[in-house]
């Protein structure tokens, strides 16, 4: 389950990079933390080519219970 979720997350992030969307707010976080001053066109190009890693760890505590 973790492997499939990781694949889905990476696929979704690659898609958002292709269309130029930054749903995680990575650009805002970089600007706030490091004071980066990129214009929109520069940031879009950097974001599209950025390598993003994500990892999900799934832990199922209980199963078979429906409330």
Image (tube, rainbow, N blue to C red):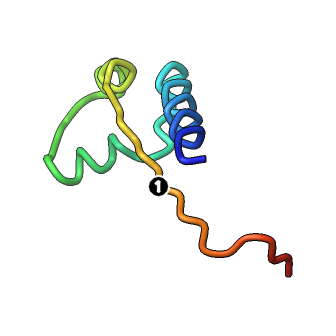
Single out the residue that lies furthest toward the bottom: 67
Judge by depth and name the residue closer to the eye, 9 or 35: 9
Question: Which residue shows up at 24% across the image and 30% down it?
Answer: 38
Question: Which residue shows up at 35% across the image and 20% down it?
Answer: 41
Occupied quadrant, residue 37: top left
In percent of width and height, residue 16 lies at: 53, 29
Judge by depth and name the residue closer to the eye, 8 or 47: 8
Location of residue 64 with respect to 16 vertically, above or below: below
Judge by depth and name the residue closer to the eye, 57 or 51: 57
Occupied quadrant, residue 62: bottom right
Single out the residue that lies furthest toward the right: 67
In percent of width and height, residue 13 lies at: 50, 33
Location of residue 56 with respect to 21 vertically, above or below: below
Single out the residue that lies furthest toward the left: 34
Location of residue 32 with respect to 6 vertically, above or below: below
Give left or right: position of 20 versus 31.
right
Give left or right: position of 18 versus 30.
right
Give left or right: position of 18 versus 43.
right
- SS under mark 1: loop
Q: Residues within 10 Å of mark 1 (few under 14, many from 20)?
A: few
Judge by depth and name the residue closer to the eye, 7 or 43: 7
In percent of width and height, residue 59 lies at: 54, 64
Question: Which residue shows up at 29% across the image and 50% down it?
Answer: 29
Query: Which residue matches tag 1?
Result: 57
In percent of width and height, residue 44 lies at: 38, 23
């Amino acid at each position: 389950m973790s492997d499939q979720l990781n694949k889905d997350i990476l696929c979704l992030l690659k898609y958002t990079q292709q269309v130029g969307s930054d749903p995680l707010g990575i650009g805002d976080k970089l600007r706030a933390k490091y004071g980066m001053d990129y214009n929109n066109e520069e940031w879009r190009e950097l974001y599209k080519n950025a390598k993003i890693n994500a990892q999900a760890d799934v832990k199922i505590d209980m199963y078979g219970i429906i409330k």
